[in-house]
Image (cartoon, grey):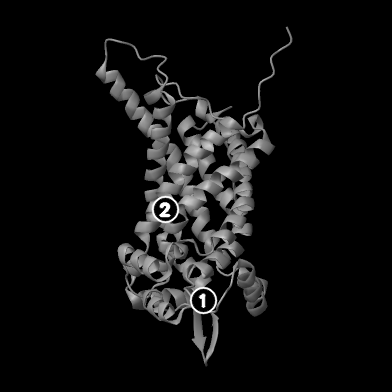
Amino acid sequence: MSLGAAEDDSASEIHLPADVDWHMLDKSKFFLLGAALFSGVSTALYPVVVLKTRQQVSSTQVSCFNMSFAIMRNEGLRGFYRGFGTSLMGTIPARALYMGALEVTKSSVGTVTVSLGFSDTTATAIANAVAGMSSALAAQVVWTPIDVVSQRLMVQTSSNNNVSNSSRNVVPNVNFCRYSNGLDAFRKILYADGLRGLYRGFGISILTYAPSNAVWWASYSVTNRLIWGGFGCYMGKKDESHSINGYRPDSKAVVAVQGLSAAMASGVSALITMPLDTIKTRLQVLDAEENGRTKPLTVLQTMKNLVKEGGLPACYRGLGPRWASMSMSATTMITTYEFLKRLSTKSQKNPAS
């Protein structure tokens, strides 16, 4: 049963396109086209991620404008794409794991929840929440090492001394070990800290992204249905003399509602999980000094540092860029994702005449 095919009473007059389930997809086309489409999305949004990361590791509050101006003045446009190659290479397998786990779990859990007698809205929310959590767990196995390397490169400044000193004022407390590229960073981190260094912050990443994805997908499904339900009530009141039974929104309306639902879900998810994301980023990027030697920070040390730097508000540094990044990423992701699923639907063979 396709959960997206059935609607609640509040929106029963509006007929949306049926959802595309896992068994309906051409898997090779799904993953191949997905890699290409999401690589384009990552390219467009990467500068916002760099800005968010630098704000999170800063020991003082720096506005988005000042941070952006400092990066552009000292490093040029290239500064907004530090670590991009590494991030892109990791995005492809991580996205493949994410999308596969998402669709398989959503289809399986959706069938079970419906058979247990849950309402369509509740079943959809549960299926989306569980699918979001499982897909985040699967993706983090690949994504955490890529995240560690790319974030180290993101906060690394130009080798020019004047630029480096100026940038230290903007992003202090960072271990300024020089990395020439992603492979060099991978090798140096592995040599210095072993495999554990590449998975620094893995636990907090799971605690960040698993609930974040669960909240996002559940919020998205509920918001999407509420918007269509409200739209159905509005249409009914607007023209009570004509039945709107059989009303089918065009593709532009469907995309607009998907985008709005994604942006609203991103706001909820960003507010709830921002402190965890800040702690995760600092664990992966910053080091502590003891007797002239550097060593990885612990979660407790990171939390103490944040309390000293401003308490709870310090945990929300970079909220603006993160919300913007999540909203833009989610809006493009969900519209691209739905488009991708329809492009990848297996062609229906005509019955023999």
Of 118 and 310, nearer the camera is 310
**Residue bearing mark 1:** 298
Which residue is located at x 61 percent, y 51 percent? Answer: 92
In this view, the mark in front (1 or 2): 2
- Give the CA separation, mark 1 to mark 2: 27 Å
**Residue 225 visible in the displayed image:** yes
Left or right: 10, with 24 as reference point = left
Question: Whole-percent x and y of residue 162?
Answer: 41, 81
Furthest residue toward top: 353
Q: Secondary structure at mark 1?
A: loop
Q: Where, quadrant-wise, is the C terminus in this rendering?
A: top right
**Residue bearing mark 2:** 325
Q: Is residue 90 above or below residue 63?
A: above
Q: Amino acid at mark 2?
A: Ser
Question: Whole-percent x and y of residue 325?
Answer: 42, 53
Q: Residues within 10 Å of mark 2 (few under 14, many from 20)?
A: many
Q: Residues within 10 Å of mark 1 (few under 14, many from 20)?
A: some
Q: Amino acid at mark 1?
A: Thr
Q: Secondary structure at mark 2?
A: helix
Q: Is residue 333 above or below residue 153?
A: above
Furthest residue toward right: 352
Of 345 and 67, nearer the camera is 67
Left or right: 179, with 68 as reference point = right
**Residue 317 visible in the displayed image:** no
Q: Is residue 142 above or below residue 28?
A: below
